[in-house]
Image (tube, rainbow, N blue to C red):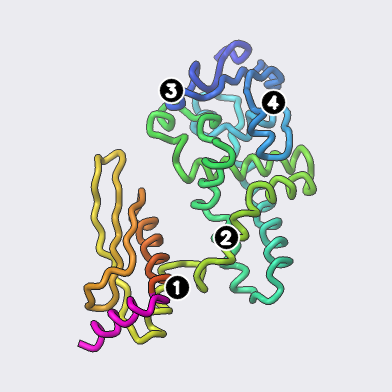
């Protein structure tokens, strides 16, 4: 392709992202960029050169269709390590009384695909910026959790390359501090399904059961989970989500909290006694 004139993103190049910005890649170094990235830089608390920014946003599917362009997987690898380091350091300092195992669970939750993809959507509005191959774009790649998560990590890696660990630390704190605070308030196992099981057993109740229902068209299915305990009929948690796992986790979170309600607990204990 003629990379001096080729537009490689947005309305001119990425069929799956009709609102995306346009990026112009020069022949050798991608020095010229028509990318409205000010909002992205503000959210990252760091600026990147056009070449490095484009590198960080280039998914392997796009690089495969444009020989000579590097994909962002090496930057993702680097960013993952930086992210884990800063998250570990933050949790270690913030929770001096927590065990190693508990800190590890907090970190795993904070840097999970679910958490990072949410950050990509809400703080970075990242989907339209990602450079995707035509097939991946047409399949909704700009809103896939895995791609969003990987791109967040590649951006963190890029900040490290450009600004070192101090700059990357600022970026990670800007993106992740809210999440790091939230995970410390979740159930004792930092996994709601495990937490509600442990709590139910401690109260002498049966195992959790999740009744699932699916509605909506195939491309936009909604999964509904209804949580009961043992052989009982009392529903202690109901949730809708875009996946079975997310629906069950949300229902489990409701159930874990419902077990603190004396009326709910009395009803469950009466069922268990039958």
* Numbered disc 1: secondary structure: helix
From the image, tell me which residue sits under label 2.
182
- Which residue is drawn at the image coordinates 51% and 22% (left, top)? 10
Viewer-side label of 2, 1: 2
Closer-to-camera residue (159/41): 41
Viewer-side label of 2, 3: 2
Q: Residues within 10 Å of mark 3 (few under 14, many from 20)?
A: some
| Residue 258 against residue 157 in the figure, above or below | below
The magenta segment: 259-274
Q: Badges 3 and 4: C-beta atoms under 8 Å apart?
A: no
From the image, tell me which residue sits under label 1.
195
Q: Badges 1 and 3: C-beta atoms under 8 Å apart?
A: no
Q: Position of residue 133 (x, y in %)?
A: 47, 28
Closer-to-camera residue (257/244): 257
Q: Residues within 10 Å of mark 1 (few under 14, many from 20)?
A: some
* Numbered disc 4: secondary structure: helix
The Cα–Cα distance between marks 1 and 3, rounded to whole angstroms, is 43 Å
Please report whichever mark, 1 or 3, sits nearer to the chain's N-terminal start. Answer: 3
Query: Does the magenta segment cover residue 266?
Result: yes
Closer-to-camera residue (192/10): 192
The Cα–Cα distance between marks 2 and 1, rounded to whole angstroms, is 16 Å
Please report whichever mark, 4 or 2, sits nearer to the chain's N-terminal start. Answer: 4
* Numbered disc 2: secondary structure: helix
From the image, tell me which residue sits under label 3.
15
From the image, tell me which residue sits under label 4.
50
* Numbered disc 3: secondary structure: loop
Viewer-side label of 4, 1: 1
| Residue 237 against residue 18 in the figure, above or below | below
Q: Position of residue 31 (x, y in %)?
A: 71, 20
The Cα–Cα distance between marks 4 and 2, rounded to whole angstroms, is 34 Å
């Amino acid at each position: 392709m003629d990379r001096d004139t080729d537009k490689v993103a947005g309305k001119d190049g990425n069929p799956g992202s009709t609102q995306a910005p346009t990026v112009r890649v020069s022949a050798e170094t991608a020095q010229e960029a028509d990318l409205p990235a000010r909002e992205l830089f503000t959210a990252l608390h760091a600026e990147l050169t056009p070449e490095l920014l484009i590198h960080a946003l280039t998914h392997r599917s796009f690089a495969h269709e444009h020989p000579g362009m590097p994909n962002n997987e090496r930057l993702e690898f680097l960013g993952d390590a930086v992210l884990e380091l800063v998250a570990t350091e933050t949790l270690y300092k913030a929770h001096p009384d927590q065990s190693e195992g508990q800190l590890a669970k907090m970190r795993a939750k904070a840097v999970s695909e679910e958490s990072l993809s949410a950050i990509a959507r809400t703080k970075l509005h990242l989907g339209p910026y990602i450079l995707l191959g035509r097939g991946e774009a047409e399949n909704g790649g700009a809103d896939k959790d895995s791609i969003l998560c990987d791109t967040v990590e590649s951006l963190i890696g890029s900040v490290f390359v450009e600004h070192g660990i101090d700059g990357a630390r600022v970026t990670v704190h800007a993106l992740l501090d809210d999440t790091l605070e939230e995970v410390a308030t979740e159930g004792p196992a930092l996994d709601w399904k495990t937490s509600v099981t442990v709590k139910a057993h401690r109260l002498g109740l049966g195992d959790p059961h999740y009744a699932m229902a699916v509605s909506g068209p195939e491309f936009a299915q909604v999964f509904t989970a209804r949580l009961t305990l043992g052989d009982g009929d009392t529903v202690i948690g109901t949730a809708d989500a875009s996946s079975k796992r997310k629906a069950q986790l949300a229902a489990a979170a409701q159930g874990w909290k419902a077990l603190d309600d004396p009326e709910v607990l009395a009803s469950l204990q009466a069922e268990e006694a039958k």
